Amino acid sequence: MDSAETDWIETFIRHLEFERRLSDLTCKHYRRDLNALAAWCDESGIENWADLDSEHFRGWSAAIFRRGLSSRSIQRRLSAARTFFRYLLREKHVQRNPVQSVSAPKAPKRLPGNLDADRMARLLDIPGDGPLICRDRAILELLYSSGLRLAELTDLNIGDVDLNDATVRVTGKGNKDRIVPVGRYALKAVREWQKLRVQVADEDEPALFVSTRGPRLSRRGVQSRVTYWAKRQGLDTRVYPHLFRHSFATHLLESSHDLRGVQELLGHANISTTQVYTHLDFQHLAQIYDQTHPRAKTKSKD
């Protein structure tokens, strides 16, 4: 594929960055998936985007499946190609979208993991004082209290948390802002961290959470501290930042059964994304039923 055709990938990425205002990470994934498609076109002797048809994409899907790519990853790559060709069609560089009718193998639905309330309380009960411990306590409390994504947490600036109003302003996917409540334990932890933050933060650094060297704390840094505290607190399961978000949603839904409310708090554009937690909620109710209902379990025959 010649350079004029592959240049369309970068033109498309700029469209995502500046017109659709997608995150750097999302644009990185689009670029990677489309570069993989361009490489396959080179292997197959395809020189122009307009030469691709639906059979080519079915062949590409089969080829990457044989290489061991999961159905979920294939779905993501086809979705990237579908969006890319929609853009090329808009720019009149192609006459059709050949990916429109191509579907990937269905991925098995996996329910998100979560920590029960007792284990979450155990994880959050971090002992000690000092800037590092106070920072980590505030991070874990805020992740669970407000159901933040990892990127949303690391992007927070000092002014985003309103301690008087007990809320945090979050910039989510697609640069959409939302206001989320902050619980009293998280408020206390953030307040304590802010008193000590000045000891480690670089001058004029706006980030709420900073590393011990002074600049904004990275996502990898948060992941590392979450793993550290999970081991330190004796949890026997893998703990990662997004697990706090899953637990937040599950515990709220178990208590309130307000799916729309949970959707708003999570910042989900579609209710279908939130509905996965109804399966978790049903599992919880089914366990209660089995444990308490007199006729829940069939007695064995004599």
Image: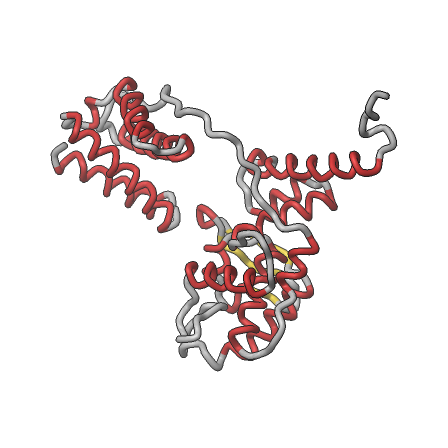
Q: What residue lies at 49% left-to-right and 55% top-to-bottom? A: 150
For the point 62% across and 39% down, which residue is it?
277
Rendered position, 129 above or below 229: below
Residue 261 placed where, x, y %?
A: 66, 44
Q: Residue furthest left?
A: 2
Between 238 and 221, the residue placed more toward the observer is 238
Instruction: Determine whether, in the image, residue 22 is placed left or right of residue 37.
Output: right
Find residue 192 and report its horizontal and vertical position in percent.
Answer: 60, 75
On the rendered structure, is 256 left or right of 80? right
Q: Is residue 5 visible?
A: yes
Q: Position of residue 223 (x, y in %)?
A: 47, 59
Q: Quadrant of residue 164?
A: bottom right
Q: Residue at x 59, y 78 (%)?
A: 129
The image shows residue 159 at horizontal and vertical percentages of 52, 67
- 76 w.r.t. 116: above or below: above
Give the quarter of the figure containing the C terminus: top right
Q: Residue 143 occupies which quadrant of the picture?
A: bottom right
Rendered image coloring scheme: secondary structure
Residue at the (40%, 77%) spot, across then down: 202
Visible residue check, residue 97: no
Q: Residue furthest front?
A: 302
Extreme-bottom residue of the structure: 199
Task: Compare residues 35 and 230 and report the one nearer the observer.
Answer: 230
Is 288 drawn above or below residue 137 in the view shown? above
- The answer to whether 183 appears left or right of 221 in the picture is right
Q: How many marks?
A: 0
Q: Quadrant of the N terminus?
A: top left
